[in-house]
Amino acid sequence: MPVDALRLSDLRSLIPDRCFEVLPLRALAYLSWDVALIAASYVAMAHMPVWFVEAPLIFLVGTLCWAIFVLGHDAGHGVFLPGRRANLIAGTVMHGMLLVPFRAWQRSHALHHAGTGHIEREEVFRASRPGQTGPAYAVFFRSGLFVLFGWPLYKLGLRNIGTCSLIRSGHYLPGSDLMAPAYRVSWYAGTLCVLASLSLYLGLFAIFGFVFFMKYILAPYFIYSGWLTFTTWMQHVSEQVPVYEAADWTPLKGALCTVDRDYGVFGWLTHRTGTCHVIHHLFPHIPHYHLPAATRAVRPALGRYYLQSKRFVLIDFIHSLRHCHVVVPADGRLAYRPAREVSSTDQTAGDVT
């Protein structure tokens, strides 16, 4: 069956209605679990200040901050709590603690969903044609450095870190293209929440010093930031994942331009955001705890268009760094290829484009 023969309504009919139910007590239980583990980790670090205890706990705290972001992501799609206002408040607080202005992120994330797999409209990791990348791109991406710095740069305005272009303004200033008059109050509320959290962290720096700040705040922040960038990259950049020209792209094709991967225990710890991402792009209004059941329901109907890798994600990451550099035409779509394999003819075509 060609992908154009698939219909979203047919896929929806296969998913039990319970998978779209928002369960607030369950969502709050996940949040409580994440916060409790973070608190316990900090207590353990304070009482056992030795590196072989602190190092894994710092990594755990950063990972759990990413898990909290995922819960805020549910709020951004309106499925963390019942009701628009409740989700707005919950998302503003959860993301604000992570220095993310919720409303601005919600808007840019909606653009990501609206343009996934589109060669010209993808919001985050937009694919590059031959001839569009230079030495800076090669160093930043093929070395993996983007994992550390991609998320802060994205929030500040490098809104397409795949092509390294300042295509739009950032998430913090009211002059951003993400601002809309109807969202003015919630925009400023998100910014104030970020400023309050930043003031708290800088206050702790002033009181307890640089080492405390590095250990308890900055290191977990960069681990969380790395998780976010790493997971997003692995969801959408792969030799398996197609990219489409504007004339060939459709919303359903775009929704299928993602791949589910094996994160081991971290898949469970971070609320399945990387292990069940295909179904999330098809139906963003499914809460994270229903994603496995919804995936099982539609997977047979998707057939070969359901993309999954059963290799551990770090193996796939190294493979993507080595092989996913530019996209070239292949079988009616664009496919990722290593730059070293792209012919001089393709390079010239990319320059013209």
Image: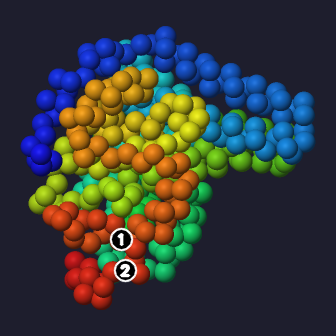
Instruction: Residue type at mark 1: give it.
Output: Arg
Instruction: Residue type at mark 2: give it.
Output: Glu
* Residue at the image point whose x is 23% and y is 41% from the top: 303
Left or right of residue 337: residue 206: right
Tag 2 secondary structure: helix
x and y percent of residue 260 in the render?
A: 40, 43
Left or right of residue 51: residue 260: left
Relative to 206, say whether 95 is above or below: above
Mark 1 surroundings: few (<14), some (14-19) or many (≥20) residues within 10 A: some
Q: Which mark is residue 337?
A: 1
Task: From the viewer's side, name the closer residue of 119 and 256.
Answer: 256
Work out which residue is located at the far top of the displayed protein and give it.
25
x and y percent of residue 346 in the render?
A: 26, 82
x and y percent of residue 191 in the render?
A: 50, 38
Work out which residue is located at the far left of the displayed protein and give it.
5
Image marks 2 and 1: residues in contact by CB distance under 8 Å: yes
Q: Which mark is residue 258?
A: none
Residue 4 in view of the camera: yes
* Residue at the image point whose x is 26% and y is 72% from the top: 328
Q: Which mark is residue 341?
A: 2
* Residue at the image point whose x is 15% and y is 47% from the top: 3
Relative to 322, say whether 48 is above or below: above
* Residue at the image point whose x is 32% and y is 55% from the top: 241
